[in-house]
Image: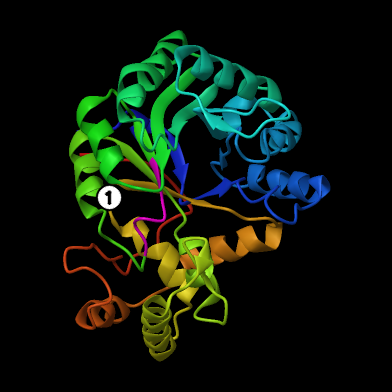
Amino acid sequence: MTSKLAAWPMPRIGLGTGWWTARNAIPQEQVIELTRFVLSRPSPFFDTAPLYGSGVSETWLGAPLQEIARASYLLASKAGYAIDSGSQARTDLSRDGILRSVENSLKRLGVGYLDIAHVHDPDGFLKEALDIALPTLCELRDQGVIRAVGAGMNQWPMLAEFARHADVDCFLLAGRYTLLEQKSLPLLDLCLEKGIALFLGGVYNTGILATGAVPEAKYNYVPAPPPIMERVKRLEAICARHDVSLQAAALQFPLAHPAVCTLIIGANSVSEFTSALTAVEAPIAPGFWDELRGEGLIEAEALVPKNVRRTSASRVRRT
């Protein structure tokens, strides 16, 4: 089935804004420089959310976006959390909550519409998401306030439920289809069958696939446990034998599945983003992937990249 997003120009790498205000926040001037750099690239794509810095990430992103025509970039945000001033963010999947969230995102970003609006992490709220939040976003899609409806989560079984029972165009899956983890393959195949475009975040598993198995390397936001450290060391050894960077392998592997259209990379600087752009285009011979599969480091059913260099931006095709 053909995805609604099939005609959209999609880069292999999009910019995620989730880390701009986390822990040691980066200066706003650095955000502006990075955003302008991404805007200078073919098919710029940005992923943000009200939850990131209680609206700060959207506000910072919005400032440089005003310098360029709205139709020249793609913009995704999310809804499902109330971020009332002075209180901790809380899940709010009510119709009013979703409408208010999208309206406030548009104001912070300074735009008239969103290309994509995802229901944000509705874990534990399947019924509310199916009966209220997603239909409300579909209303906004019908009105032209958003162009596509999706859901963004760190787990895949619930996204599979949405794929079966909701009118969705796309998903953002974080951390569950990576060089270290491919248990979500049933979701990817389902998305391909139903024409649902898939964005992937967390492809470094929050750090270890970028840093390698260094002391205090992070895996799923916490120090990596010994089995993960050992697995990454095995990956690094094969990378060394084939003169392949771990970052290149981590970025290119998930893009091999045809359901995946774009990786969302949380960069804080131009150099970080440029590093990802270089790594995703680095040549990797088929023998590298053959050895990973032979060593049992990737699932037998997982697709691997072919030895074909692709352009940095392409149009999503679903058959």
Q: Is residue 19 left or right of residue 8?
A: right
Q: In front here: 74 or 307?
A: 74
Residue at x 52%, y 65% (from the top left corner)? 222
Residue at x 72%, y 36% (from the top left corner)? 56
Q: Magenta part of the protein: which range?
A: 172-178
Residue at x 69%, y 37% (from the top left corner)? 61
Report x, y in % for residue 306: 28, 66
- The correct choice, above or below, for 157 with respect to 251 in the image is above
Classify the position of the N terminus by image quarter. top left
122 part of magenta stretch = no
Q: Residue furthest top?
A: 143
Classify the position of the C terminus by image quarter. top left
Report x, y in % for residue 163: 25, 33
Q: Is residue 311 left or right of residue 100?
A: left
CA neighbours of label 1 inside 10 A, class few (<14), some (14 to 19), many (20+) = some
Classify residue 148 by image quadrant.
top left
Q: Is residue 287 left or right of residue 95?
A: left
- The correct choice, above or below, for 298 with respect to 100 in the image is below
Label 1 residue SS: loop
Residue that carries the numbered disc 1 in the rendered image:
258
> In the rendered picture of this protein, how many numbered marks are placed on residues?
1
| Residue 318 visible at all | no
Q: In front here: 293 or 311?
A: 293
Classify residue 161 by image quadrant.
top left
Q: In front here: 97 or 194?
A: 97
Please, which colouring scheme is shown?
Answer: rainbow
| Residue 260 visible at all | yes
Residue at x 61%, y 32% (from the top left corner)? 50
Q: Amino acid at mark 1?
A: Pro
- The correct choice, above or below, for 135 with respect to 245 in the image is above
